[in-house]
Amino acid sequence: MGKYIGIDFGDKRIGIAVTNDDKNFVLPRDTVDNKKIFDYLKDLTASEEIEKIVVGLPLNSAGQDTAQTKKVRQFIERLKQLFTVDIAEQDERMTTKASIQLLKGLNLKSKKKKKIDQNAAMLILQDYLARHA
């Protein structure tokens, strides 16, 4: 039984979250420079038993694709070429806003942008797990 990775894709930074083996909780893991993401994921999947990668899909409020959706779909296609684990998509609407609110509630200010990305990845992965429970 392996872990799931959650990804909040961004043009500059990519937030990463990971489940435990039982997939009953998710923790923010890291924020990675977009240019280094594939090497990072290769290392992570080699060092831990990863079963699935869940990527947040940015849709507009009506559930339609955006300009960013095309970039994320290209990223997903590259993941499918490089990795043998399952790749899934999860609607990520409102996760960044929810992440900002979470951090405000915790009164965390240091490295805020990196924390926002990690927490958005955590929320994406939690939503995916809730939908597929």
Image (cartoon, rainbow, N blue to C red):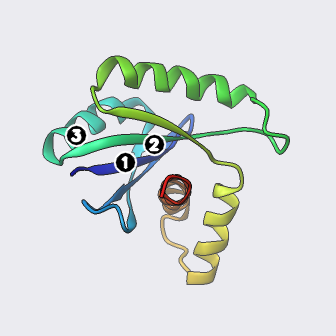
Q: Are marks 1 and 2 in contact (CB under 8 Å)?
A: yes
Q: Which residue is mark 2?
A: 54
Callout 2 environment at 10 Å: few (<14), some (14 to 19), or many (20+)? many
Q: Which residue is mark 1?
A: 5
Q: CA distance from mark 3 to mark 2?
A: 13 Å
Towards the viewer: 110 or 40: 40
Say the numbered circle drawn on residue 69: none
Picture coordinates of residue 30, whole percent (x, y): 37, 55
Q: Residue at x 21, y 51 (%)?
A: 1
Count of numbered badges drawn on the protein: 3
Towards the viewer: 105 or 124: 124
Q: Amino acid at mark 1?
A: Ile
- Mark 1 or 2, nearer chain start: 1
Picture coordinates of residue 20, whole percent (x, y): 28, 62
- Mark 3 or 2, nearer chain start: 3
Q: Which residue is mark 3?
A: 45
